[in-house]
Image (spheres, rainbow, N blue to C red):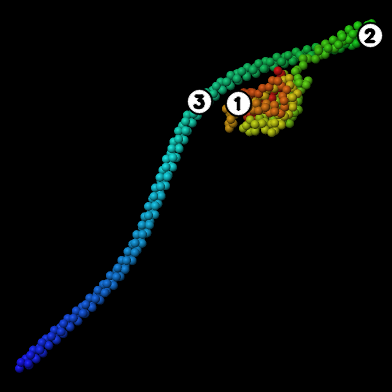
Amino acid sequence: MRPNIDTRQNAGRTRHAARWFALLALALTAAGCAILEERDYLRERTEMQEVKLQQMKDSLEQWQTAHDKLQTQLTERDQRITRLEAEQSVRERELERQLAAARTELDTARQESASLRADLDKTQTATQLQADLATREKTTLQSSVTALQTDLAAARAENDQLRKQLATAQARAKELEGSVAGLKKQLAGATESAGEAAKLRKELEKTRAAAKKSARPEAEPAGEGAGLNQARSDFAEALADLVRRKDAQVVGSADRVTVRLQSDFLFDPQTVVVTAEGREVLARVAQVLERYGDYQLLVEGHTDTTPVRNMPFPDNLALSAQRATNVLREIQDLTKLPQKQVRASGSASWIPVAPNTTAEGQRQNRRVEIILARP
């Protein structure tokens, strides 16, 4: 009986174990399914995480690229700022240098302005002195003109008296010529002695000398036998073309001959330099002057009333004097002047020959006068 019971117990245990194994298999199967599901889930999560991770890597690379670009831009900007700061520093130094130079120039300009003001005060004083001098010289010149007019009237009266004396001398000469004719007859008829003939010859010579002296008025001083009238004719002939075109004028008086040459053709514009045409005209004048060594030679410069501009002369007086001096030097270079008394001077606009109210009058007043005068 005992073996059957054990058999039954073993069979029961086997069934019980089989149940447990079946339950365990079911549990393991369920767990495996759950594990597989969990694995699939985790795999999907992993793939999703990998996708997100890749996206994050891409985003990180893009950010890194943007970061590198920004870093490059920042570096360039820093370099540009550094360069601009350096340029600004250079500009500031240059501006400081320019400011210092400007201040120096300003100080120099202030000093020059002070100097110019001082010079202006001196110039105004000198101008006033020159004006006073011009007034005194004008008064003197007016007195001289009055005296010359008086002398001219006296010379004219003397000339009339000389003409009367000449007429009387010519009449006396005719009488003496009659006496000479009578003496000649006496000489022809005198045969008494040689002594008487010699005496008659001496008387005849004395009579002839007295006749010549009475018939000839007092002669002018002249070179090579020519007087002021001849000099005037020589100048007029030598300058005939200039006289016709009104660039020259020859004027004569009792004691002088004046040759007036217009400055507009005689000098280069705004200078005291004699032109080529002016030298050619002065050569003609020099040829005439060579024949009149017994007279004074005066060269006078004249201007109009226009103030001096753009020329290195303070006024018309200095300009006219320099032009007269240059004309005299040109003549002296052209020929060896025989005149012992030679002078050059300037008269500015103080002795006009025409009104300065018109252009033609001003042109006539701009002149140089070459004067041949009695000593």
- Mark identifier at residue 135: none
Per the model, the C-alpha gap separating discs 3 and 2 is: 95 Å
Residue 229, horizontal then vertical, whole percent? 75, 21
Identify the mark nearer the N-term, 2 or 1. 2
- Taking the image as shown, residue 128 lies to the left or right of residue 235, namely left
Percent position (x, y) of residue 160?
75, 14
Point out which mark residue 318 bears.
1
Residue 358, horizontal then vertical, whole percent: 63, 29
The amino acid type found where label 1 is placed reads Ala
Instruction: Kindly report the distance in space between the C-alpha atoms of the residues bearing marks 3 and 1.
Output: 20 Å
Please tell me how crowded label 2 is: few (under 14), some (14-19), or many (20+) other residues with Cα within 10 Å. Answer: few
Q: Find out whether the residues at labels 3 and 1 contact each other: C-beta distance under 8 Å.
A: no
Label disc, if present, on residue 121 of the rendered structure: 3
The answer to whether the residues at label 2 and label 1 have Cβ atoms under 8 Å apart is no
Vertical order, 56 against 227 (above or below):
below
Q: Secondary structure at mark 2?
A: helix
